[in-house]
Amino acid sequence: MIRYYVNQKLDLDSENGIWLDYADHTWIFMIKDTLWQLEEIRNAETKGITVSFIQKGIIDAFLVQIHDCMETSDVPFCLLDATKDLMNSFKDSEPYQMNLLLIDDTNTIKAIRKGTFNKEFTKGMKRILQQRKLNIYDERSYSAAYTKLCKKYEPFELEPFALYTQQF
């Protein structure tokens, strides 16, 4: 398992935004911005964080909101890009973890928040993703579906479609 710590400099080549990684039963939400204010850092470390899992058509995504810091953002992921590690996790009962990292423009971690998804969230998500493996689609159709979804909905408008939601 990769260990993250505040002030750690990451080897990234990315622009500002939010993206997702997965390793060892842990969903890692990386949120990069040019500058994080001290209040935003404190809020990410101490205020409520809401993470939801949605499925809309062939799109699987998380919705992430940091109260008093960041409005709801959508974080899609395509099961076609899943690692063997993620695929193997569908077969076990180990709960999923969550790491949320605030990263600045120098690729330095400014805040970290960790948590464990509850049994219902983990079990339901594993079941849904296991079924998703049976769907036949390619990356082009996934990309087109995600673009269409983004044109139709703002991230906060996707909240009613949440299958599982958890507060951290």
Image (spheres, rainbow, N blue to C red):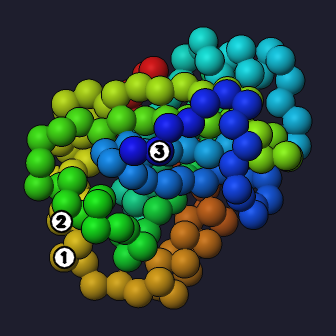
Q: Secondary structure at mark 3?
A: loop
Compare residues 62 and 81 and report the one nearer the observer: 81
Q: Is residue 113 at all visible to an observer of this figure?
A: yes
Compare residues 146 and 157 and report the one nearer the observer: 146
User: 143 above or below 5?
Assistant: below
**Quarter of the image with the N terminus in it:** top left
Q: Residue 65 in the image: state x and y as whole percent.
A: 59, 32
Between the C-alphas of marks 2 and 3, the distance is: 28 Å
Which quadrant holds residue 110?
top right
Q: Which mark is residue 134?
A: 1
Residue to which mark 3 is pinned: 2
Type of amino acid at the residue the image marks with label 1: Leu
Q: Which mark is residue 31?
A: none
Q: How many marks?
A: 3
Q: Residue 162 in the image: state x and y as whole percent.
A: 39, 42
The residue at the point 54 percent across, 25 percent down is 113
Mark 2, Cα crowd under 10 Å, few <14 / some 14-19 / many 20+, is: few
Residue to which mark 2 is pinned: 131
Q: Residue 157 in the image: state x and y as whole percent.
A: 57, 45
Q: Secondary structure at mark 1?
A: loop
Direction from residue 153 to residue 99 in the image, left or right: left
Which quadrant holds residue 48?
top right
Compare residues 112 and 124 and report the one nearer the observer: 112
Between the C-alphas of marks 2 and 1, the distance is: 6 Å
Direction from residue 3 to residue 111 in the image, left or right: right
**Quarter of the image with the C terminus in it:** top left
Q: Earlier in the sequence, mark 2 or mark 3?
A: 3
Q: Earlier in the sequence, mark 3 or mark 1?
A: 3
The residue at the point 30 percent across, 39 percent down is 96
Mark 1, Cα crowd under 10 Å, few <14 / some 14-19 / many 20+, is: few
Between the C-alphas of marks 3 and 1, the distance is: 30 Å
Contact flag, marks 2 and 1 (Cβ < 8 Å):
yes
